Every structure is written in C-alpha cells, then in structure tokens.
Amino acid sequence: ETGVTQSPTHLIKTRGQQVTLRCSSQSGHNTVSWYQQALGQGPQFIFQYYREEENGRGNVPPRFSGLQFPNYSSELNVNALELDDSALYLCASSLPSPGTDTQYFGPGTRLTVL
Amino acid sequence: GIQVEQSPPDLILQEGANSTLRCNFSDSVNNLQWFHQNPWGQLINLFYIPSGTKQNGRLSATTVATERYSLLYISSSQTTDSGVYFCAVERTGRRALTFGSGTRLQVQP
C-alpha cells in the first residue's frame, strides 16, 4: 500500500505566473483535500474532491482551482500567482466510512513566489 | 466557522519528561485528529479520536466531546518528539479539517 505522494517537492515561480501541483492519493482512497500552510501557521483548507466532484471549498479566491481524475489523483492549479501564495501546499486523502474519516497527508509542495 | 485553540503555544522539555497538550474547540465535531509535523513539513497522523481515549506507545489522547476539548499526553519524551503538534477538527456536516495554531515542542537532551 503506497501513501500519499505529491509533486514537485519544491517550486519557484514569479508573480503573475500559473502553477500546477499534483497529488496521488493513498491506494483505495476516493477523497482528496488540499490545504495551504503559510510559515508559522496551521494548514488552511482550500477545497476537497470526492469522486471527481468538488465537495467543499474554503475561503480562497477563484484563482485556485482543482481537478480529480478517475484514478482519484488530483491537481491544484493557481493562476496569477501573488507573493502571498508562497506556502507549503499539502494534499490529504481519505476513504470516509462510518466511524472513521482519517485524513492522510502527503509530504507537501513548497511554493515560493518571487 | 469553528474555532480551535491549542495550548501551550511553545513547550521546552528535558528528555524523559512528560507533557500534556490541550486542544479546545467551539462546536460539535465528528472528526478530531492529532498530528505531528516534522521539520520537513510532513504531517504524521497520531490519533483519530473524535471521542474517548486511545494509546499508542508513549502517546495517548483523550477527547471529551461534550466539553469540547482534547488532550494529547506524551510520556518519557525523546528528542525525536520535537516538532509541531496540531489538533484538527471537522465540524459535523462539514468536510474540511480546521487546524489549531499548533504547539511547538522542543525536547532537549
């Protein structure tokens, strides 16, 4: 059983550019959530995908969008990057079922916007 | 939205000491998890504990859902326990984890 993986590990972009981050969910998990963690803070929810449909969205601008594919892997896209988008982006997968909804996190992608 | 408060914000211990970390939350939850974030940013699951008590080696956790708090106990701390401990909750009817601001633990040899 493989865990949650994310790519790339690190990324440097400039203001105004676009970026795509990728996440492979843990085997058998059908739900993927994305979180943004600024330096020194706790992760903040971006959105969640369940069976290829958006299933909840945090307080993030429309510049943030996502996809989930039939194999349950996912992408996070950010357009028109701003300096404040610099953060660690974490992906979590889960298989919600009665009595448990444990989310398992990947190692993250560290994005720096210059 | 739901508020999650963790205390203390910072904790320095000598190796071998015990500690208790607290998490208070402001609404009913159907999911509560404790995580350890290592220096490389990886969030490691410690417990899924929306209610009750669990133990795993030197770590144990208790959640009293009716009083809206959870406690994480670390016994006989080791330097490898250093890092940031997060409590995260999922409000009933929502599908997002809300994290506290964390407790930064430093265990000195």
Image (tube, coloured by chain):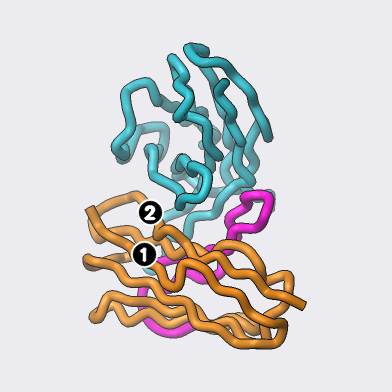
Chain colours: A cyan, B orange
Camera-nearest label, 2 or 1: 2
Q: Which residue is mark 2?
A: B97
Q: Nearer the viewer, residue A20 or B2?
A: B2
Q: Position of residue B86 (x, y in %)?
A: 48, 63
Magenta-drawn stretch contains B6: no
For residue B104, what is the image quadrant?
bottom right
Most common secondary structure along the magenta stretch: strand
Image mark 1: chain: B
**Residue drawn where x is 23% and y is 66% of the image:** B26
Q: CA distance from mark 2 to mark 1?
A: 8 Å
Q: Is residue B50 magenta?
A: yes
> In this figure, which residue is indicated by the disc labeled 1?
B31
Q: Chain of mark 2?
A: B
The image quarter containing residue B105 is bottom right
How many marks on residues? 2
Q: What is the secondary structure assignment of the residue under circle 2?
A: strand
In magenta, the rendered stretch is B31-54
| Residue drawn at 60 percent across, 60 percent down | B44
Q: Position of residue A70 (x, y in %)?
A: 50, 31
Q: Would residue A5 be visible to someone looking at this image?
A: yes
Instruction: Work out whether B58 lies above or below A15.
Output: below
Q: Earlier in the sequence, mark 2 or mark 1?
A: 1
- Whether tag 2 and tag 1 are in contact, CB under 8 A, the answer is yes
Q: Identify which residue is drawn at 32% across, 71% down.
A: B24
The residue under label 1 is which amino acid type? Asn
Say yes or no: labels 2 and 1 on the same chain.
Answer: yes
Secondary structure state at the residue bearing disc 1 = strand
The single residue placed furthest to the top in the displayed view is A16
Specify whether residue A69 is in view: no
Quadrant holding the C terminus of chain A: top right
Say which of A55 and B21 sits in front: B21
